Amino acid sequence: MSTEPLLKIQNVSFRYDEETEHILKNISFTVKEGEWVSIVGHNGSGKSTLAKLIAGVENTFDGDIKIENQTIKSTSLSAFHHHIGFVFQNPDNQFVGSTVKYDVAFGLENRQVSYEKMHQIVSRVLKDVDMKDKKNYEPTALSGGQKQRVAIAGVLALQPKLIILDEATSMLDPEGKKDIMSMIQYLNQEQGMTVLSITHDLSEVVTSDKVIVLNKGSVALSGTVDDIFAHADTLVAYGLDMPFEMRVAQLLDLQKGFLTYDELLECLT
């Protein structure tokens, strides 16, 4: 495993033109191989713009972004895109195949992977996301959570070094969100997948190794989950909603800081 961070954001600032204010202001952080980093912020905090910079959609910015210590500035997208897999909030926008298995195979076909190897990879990643039994289904026939699993399988098939979730659960119901986050946790902890999660939902950061809170384009808070939730009042002031467990704990004046559901039950019994 390399000692260099997989992703390095160095003093990044961005605005669309000289007449507008900066959307991002001097952002710096790293993502190490095997790490799960969450970027959280209210709408307008700059988190989606940051995702666009990492993806190369916007490429004129101050500072630097490096992937495996290689700058993405003035670099062809194809030179680094195989390192990154994006999962967006609406999986319908990512489907191109008539069935689940054909959709997952699409990116492999573009890379001219042999049929035999393609079949092995598609079977493996559909098993990883628990969708192997739906391989012959039409994507449109699936539930929202199942569609997102297929979108993630399509990304995993290309074996990226880093998977970026850009509000990937925002269109799902609570059960679907829980389902997807549990699957991502499995991929991170059991298979070593490096994860960068971009979200406005604080309940999705609880399994992260590191959390970065953006507010008005700047890094307002950064640290472990416990570090971040020690500033509950500040998070609320930034327009973020506390997870259910913490709202209950605050109402009952229980312990400060982050609480899991099981820890909340323990406090109540």
Image (cartoon, grey):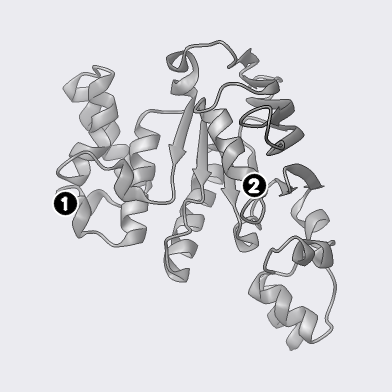
Is 39 positioned to the left or the right of 161 in the image? right
For the residue pair 187 and 231, the one nearer the viewer reads as 231
CA neighbours of label 2 inside 10 A, class few (<14), some (14 to 19), many (20+): many
The percent position of residue 265, horizontal first and vertical second, equals 69, 82
Q: Quadrant of the N terminus?
A: top right
127 vs 250, nearest the viewer: 250
Circle 1 crowding by C-alpha within 10 Å: few under 14, some 14–19, many from 20: some
Quarter of the rendering containing residue 180: bottom left
Residue drawn at (68%, 39%), measured in percent from left and top?
23
Q: Residue 67, image x and y in percent? A: 60, 21
Residue 130 makes an appearance in the image: no
Query: Along the horizontal axis of the image, is 218 left or right of 101?
Result: right
Q: Earlier in the sequence, mark 1 or mark 2?
A: 2
Residue type at mark 2? Ser
Q: Which residue bears the numbered disc 2?
A: 38
Q: Is residue 249 above or below residue 36?
A: below
- Residue at the far front: name it: 19
* Pointers 1 and 2 in contact (C-beta within 8 Å): no
Q: Is residue 189 visible?
A: yes
In this rendered view, identify the residue nearer to me: 71 or 21.
Answer: 21
Residue 216 in the image, given as x and y percentages of width and height: 73, 48
Element on which disc 1 rests = loop
What is the total number of numbered labels drawn onto the structure image? 2
- Is 55 placed above or below 229 here? above
Q: Residue 268's quadrant in the figure?
A: bottom right
Residue 138 numbered tag: 1
How far across and down, in percent of the image, does residue 174 sit? 47, 70
Amino acid bearing label 1: Glu
* 63 displayed left or right of 205: right
